[in-house]
Image (cartoon, helix red, strand yellow):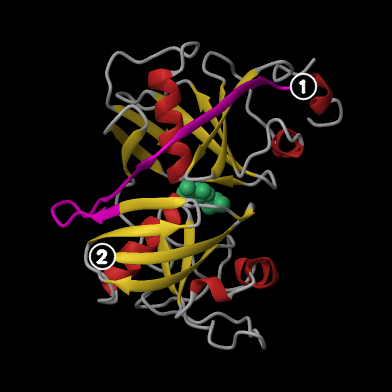
């Protein structure tokens, strides 16, 4: 029987970004893409991102996280999910709790220190943005990633051709638009996500700058589709906005599910993301999910 059968999980959200948290510390099991897709397919455990906790790898860290999208692909970053994991590690009565309140979580993209602001609000240090074309990554050697060009031509939205690109441990493209609500994400999101300029696909943001400290944002996520919020996209948008002189280095980013405060700190180049988390329920993974998934 799969070690995931009957395993406890938490269903949470970060501003409506649907997050499932699975604690596999103490187990050698690594969730496969097929298992992640099976978990996502059950309405009880449905997620935009599945955050799987493993035993810590680097000294001084509290856990290693693998992050899965709905389609089973893996990401190096998920801002909203990282806050949910911090809540779970510090406040869930069943999970083993680290001794200190400030956590350091690790992903394949690096270390993420997390600090509680209240019981349910956390600040994640998302690290330095990746601005070089090959780190994002992009197909072409752009000397300046503030403006790139996509291959995709959209007859219904010909203005969507020149996004900014930023890596936050995952790839992001930000299109600067007058009205973020005007776009049919389900129709155009997949085309831009798969544009050949993004060799690892990209998370696609539509950013409407209201003022230097306020941006309205809608996101089509790589591997997950339209979500109510995307923390790493909010970080990437603030960085790109500040680089283009559209925003300051600190702004409120309003997503369909609510607000995140993002700061790109001058002193160390790190991006800080602050926002809420919410526990919805706990559940147990149905053994039937893993009958065909290996
Ligand atoms: N919702 C997440 C981002 C998931 C990114 C994922 N879709 C990818 O990079 O493949 C967040 O809050 O940052």
Question: Where is residue 121 drawn, in percent x and y?
Answer: 34, 35
Q: Locate the N terminus and report the quarter of the image it occupies.
A: top right
Is the CB–ligand 1 distance for label 1 below 8 Å?
no
Observer-nearest of 141 and 66 = 66
Which residue occupies the extreme left position in the image?
Answer: 267
Q: Are marks 1 and 2 in contact (CB under 8 Å)?
A: no
Question: Where is residue 292 drawn, in percent x and y?
Answer: 86, 30
Question: Where is residue 194 drawn, in percent x and y?
Answer: 64, 67
Observer-nearest of 30 and 205 = 205
Sequence-wise, which precedes: disc 1 or disc 2? Answer: 2
Q: Locate the C terminus and report the quarter of the image it occupies.
A: top right
Question: Where is residue 90 drawn, in percent x and y?
Answer: 38, 20
Q: Picture quarter containing residue 199?
A: bottom right
Q: Picture quarter containing residue 49?
A: top right
Check disc 2: other Cα within 10 Å, few if <14, some if 14-19, many if 20+.
some
Main SS, magenta region, reads strand
Residue visible at 44% across and 80% down? 178
Decide if residue 114 is in sight here. Answer: yes
- Magenta part of the chain: 262-285
Q: Secondary structure at mark 1?
A: loop
Q: CA distance from mark 1 to mark 2?
A: 45 Å
Residue visible at 35% across and 15% down? 98
Q: Secondary structure at mark 2?
A: loop
Residue 94 higher or lower than 103, as above or below:
above
Residue 230 higher or lower than 121, as above or below:
below
Instruction: Report the mark closest to the observer, 1 or 2.
Output: 2
Residue visible at 34% across and 68% down? 240
Residue occupied by mark 1: 286
Question: Is residue 275 found inside the magenta-colored segment of the image?
Answer: yes
Residue occupied by mark 2: 213
Question: Is residue 235 found inside the magenta-colored segment of the image?
Answer: no
Decide if residue 169 is in sight here. Answer: no
């Amino acid at each position: 029987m799969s070690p995931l059968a009957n395993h406890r999980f938490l269903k949470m959200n970060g501003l409506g970004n649907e997050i499932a948290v699975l604690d596999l510390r103490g187990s050698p099991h690594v969730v496969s893409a097929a298992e992640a897709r099976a978990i996502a397919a059950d309405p009880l455990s449905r997620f935009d991102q599945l955050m799987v906790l493993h035993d810590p790898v680097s000294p001084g860290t509290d856990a290693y996280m693998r992050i899965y999208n709905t389609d089973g692909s893996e990401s190096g970053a998920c801002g909203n999910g990282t806050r949910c994991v911090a809540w779970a590690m510090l406040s869930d009565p069943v999970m083993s709790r680290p001794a200190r309140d400030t956590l350091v979580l690790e992903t394949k993209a690096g270390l993420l220190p997390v600090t509680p602001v209240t019981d349910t609000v956390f600040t994640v240090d998302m690290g330095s943005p990746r601005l070089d074309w090959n780190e994002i990554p992009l197909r072409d050697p752009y000397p300046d990633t503030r403006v790139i060009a996509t291959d995709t031509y959209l007859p219904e939205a010909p203005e969507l051709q020149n996004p900014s690109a930023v890596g936050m441990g995952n790839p992001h493209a930000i299109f600067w638009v007058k009205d973020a609500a005007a776009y049919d994400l389900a129709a155009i999101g997949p085309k831009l996500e798969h544009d050949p300029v993004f060799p690892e696909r990209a998370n696609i943001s539509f950013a409407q700058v209201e003022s230097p400290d306020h941006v309205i944002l809608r996101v089509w996520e790589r591997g997950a589709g339209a979500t109510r919020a995307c923390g790493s996209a909010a970080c990437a948008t603030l960085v790109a906005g500040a680089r283009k002189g559209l925003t300051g280095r600190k702004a409120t980013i309003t997503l369909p599910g609510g607000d995140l405060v993002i700061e790109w700190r001058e002193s160390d180049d790190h991006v800080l993301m602050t926002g809420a988390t919410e526990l919805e329920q706990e559940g147990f993974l149905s053994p039937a999910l893993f009958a065909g998934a290996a």
